[in-house]
């Protein structure tokens, strides 16, 4: 299978590409604009591989994207390109509207135009996998059941609203134009190579520097944490075996408050860095003013993908955090340089 992956230089996209090249026979075309959060350094393990190629392109550029479909003739699209940081969406929503909504619309138009040129057998094989987030469902109370695929959309941030819009566009292109679409919505990802603006790398790098570790509000906001390699495996499972027109929630059933997560990371740092002058690292914690409209809790019911496709996460939170913290310690200089650019 030839897979065109948008956003393949990002955190999740690069994990998907590694998974494709290491565990399948698929070939990959990585299409990425190379924005601030994109890092080709995360591709060191497969640069030059026979089944891998890279194209620098903006998914909003209809002409360029149409040319790439014609050039590479993919059997499938995995659409991961997106602006994804909630804080940035609050400060400047226009970039999220442009990439997540206009970009998805452009990509869907190019995909359906290309799909219509295929012969019947190729049409049958083609898949468009739209990758999204659990944040489109809004916020849960502490006693409420986890999000299912039937949970009504209720996005609360510019980011989640833009992703909800893109989800609905993908749904419309399937039902109106018969484009073979599958959709997935995942919980919070973590792991090596994540751009250091997200919570877990922020905590680790602040602790390594001896700076205050910022925690929004009272730290009681809850998230379901999914190791990125497990997510990559789930995404390929959905692409290869998911039913057309269906949505699959992907999560680990590992809910944790932000405060408990920070405590866990600090304990790992204390153990891995016994000579650190900043021990105990939890002493660096500082509660800061909460972000506007901060959703209280996300929790994902992933029983559908387990029941119908046989996927389940393979990495425990303890093991995933250990690997992640160790990676950021080993790659501290790389992460600092990324933030300086």
Image: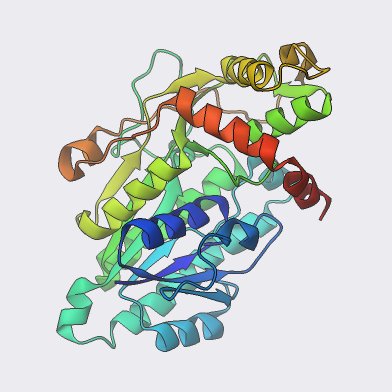
Question: Number of numbered discs present?
Answer: 0
Q: Is residue 145 left or right of residue 268?
A: left
Residue under the point 68% across and 39% down: 330
Q: Is residue 16 left or right of residue 183?
A: right
Does any portion of residue 289 appear in the rendered image? no
- Above or below residue 290? Residue 3 is below
Q: Residue 317: horizontal and vertical position, in percent?
A: 46, 25
Which quadrant: the C terminus? bottom right
Residue under the point 28% across and 52% down: 238
- Figure quadrant of residue 281: top right
Q: Residue 21: horizontal and vertical position, in percent?
A: 39, 62
- Figure quadrant of residue 274: top right
Tell which of 58 and 160 is nearer to you.
58
Does any portion of residue 164 appear in the rendered image? yes
Q: Residue 191: horizontal and vertical position, in percent?
A: 54, 39
- Above or below residue 283? Residue 58 is below
Rendered image coloring scheme: rainbow
Q: Residue 18: horizontal and vertical position, in percent?
A: 45, 57
Q: Is residue 126 left or right of residue 101?
A: left
Tell which of 337 and 46 is nearer to you.
46
Residue under the point 35% across and 60% down: 129
Which quadrant: the N terminus? bottom left
- Figure quadrant of residue 325: top right
């Amino acid at each position: 299978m030839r897979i065109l992956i948008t956003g393949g230089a990002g955190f999740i996209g690069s994990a998907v590409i590694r998974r494709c090249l290491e565990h399948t026979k698929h070939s990959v075309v990585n299409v990425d604009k190379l924005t601030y959060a994109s890092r080709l350094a995360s591709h060191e393990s497969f640069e030059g591989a026979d089944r891998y190629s890279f194209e620098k392109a903006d998914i909003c550029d209809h002409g360029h994207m149409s040319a790439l479909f014609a050039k590479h003739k993919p059997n499938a699209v995995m659409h991961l390109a997106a602006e994804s940081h909630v804080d940035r969406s609050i400060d400047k929503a226009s970039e999220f509207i442009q990439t997540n909504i206009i970009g998805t619309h452009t990509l869907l138009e190019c995909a359906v135009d290309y799909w219509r040129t295929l012969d019947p057998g190729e049409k049958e094989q083609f898949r468009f996998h739209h990758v999204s987030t659990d944040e489109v469902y809004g916020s849960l109370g502490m006693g409420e059941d986890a999000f299912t695929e039937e949970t009504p959309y209720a996005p609360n941030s510019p980011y989640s609203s833009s992703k909800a819009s893109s989800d609905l566009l993908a749904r419309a292109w399937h039902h109106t134009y018969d484009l073979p679409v599958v959709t997935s919505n995942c919980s919070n990802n973590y792991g090596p190579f994540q751009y250091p603006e997200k919570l877990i790398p922020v905590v680790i790098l602040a602790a390594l520097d001896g700076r205050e570790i910022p925690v929004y509000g009272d730290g009681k906001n809850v998230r379901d944490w999914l190791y990125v390699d497990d997510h990559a495996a789930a995404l390929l499972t959905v692409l290869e075996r998911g039913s057309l027109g269906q949505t699959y929630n992907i999560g680990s059933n590992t809910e944790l408050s932000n405060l408990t997560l920070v405590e866990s990371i600090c304990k790992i740092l204390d153990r891995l860095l016994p000579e650190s002058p900043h021990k105990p690292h939890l002493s660096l914690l500082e509660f800061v003013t909460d972000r506007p409209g901060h959703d209280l809790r996300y929790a994902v019911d992933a029983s559908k993908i387990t029941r119908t496709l046989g996927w389940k996460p393979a990495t425990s939170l303890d093991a995933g955090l250990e690997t992640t913290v160790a990676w950021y310690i080993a790659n501290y200089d790389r992460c600092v340089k990324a933030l300086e650019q």
